[in-house]
Amino acid sequence: MSLVKFKRRPFGNLITQDFFDMDDFFDNRNWVRNMMPDQFWNGKISQPALNIKENHDTFEIELAAPGFAKEDFEVTIEDGCLNISAEKSVSDEEKEENYTRKEFSYNAFQRSLQLPESVKQEAIKAKYNDGILSFTLAKKEEAKKTPPKKVQIS
């Protein structure tokens, strides 16, 4: 007994014919690749989650970056953008009589956020604690919202 690849019928259902061909389904993943950028499939995209909250006086940004140290981050402000990047590499080597084991890991990311004109760029504060990089961005006085006033109806 031998296995023979199933051949499609020449006049099969043209709409579902290619979709349900299991060889193409597992071998050719272009239908999924077109939904994501190529950098995702090559393992080049790694961006941490980000939360942004607006308060009366400030904007608060939280960036989840566990496993890094405070010294691993580089934060710059350039052309109205807040640029956040981090890079970390770890290597380990163990030498024994009949073998040598080397392991290494590398982790990096970069995020850029366009700052609104209402932010005082010279008053941005950053803090790293328990894997969360937090930013406090103070607003300019003219950008702060005034609370709504009630109007009496006579």
Image (spheres, rainbow, N blue to C red):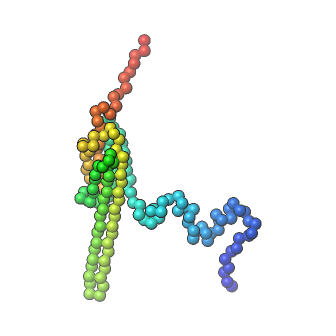
Position of 71 relative to 25 (above/below): above
Residue in the image at 26% along x and 60% along y: 72
Foreground residue among 44 and 151: 44
Observer able to see residue 130: no
Displayed quadrant of residue 57: top left
Report the number of numbered marks. 0
Residue 25 in the image: x percent, y percent?
60, 67
Q: In this view, does 140 lie to the left or right of 30?
A: left
Q: Quadrant of the C terminus?
A: top left
Furthest toward the top, the residue is 154
Position of 103 relative to 61 (above/below): below
Position of 136 relative to 47 (above/below): above
Observer able to see residue 94: yes
Residue in the image at 61% along x and 71% along y: 23
Q: Quadrant of the N terminus?
A: bottom right
Residue in the image at 39% along x and 18% along y: 151
Residue 95 in the image: x percent, y percent?
26, 82
Residue 120 in the image: x percent, y percent?
27, 40
Furthest toward the front, the residue is 79
Furthest toward the right, the residue is 11
Furthest toward the bottom, the residue is 98
Position of 133 relative to 97 (above/below): above
Residue 58 in the image: x percent, y percent?
30, 39
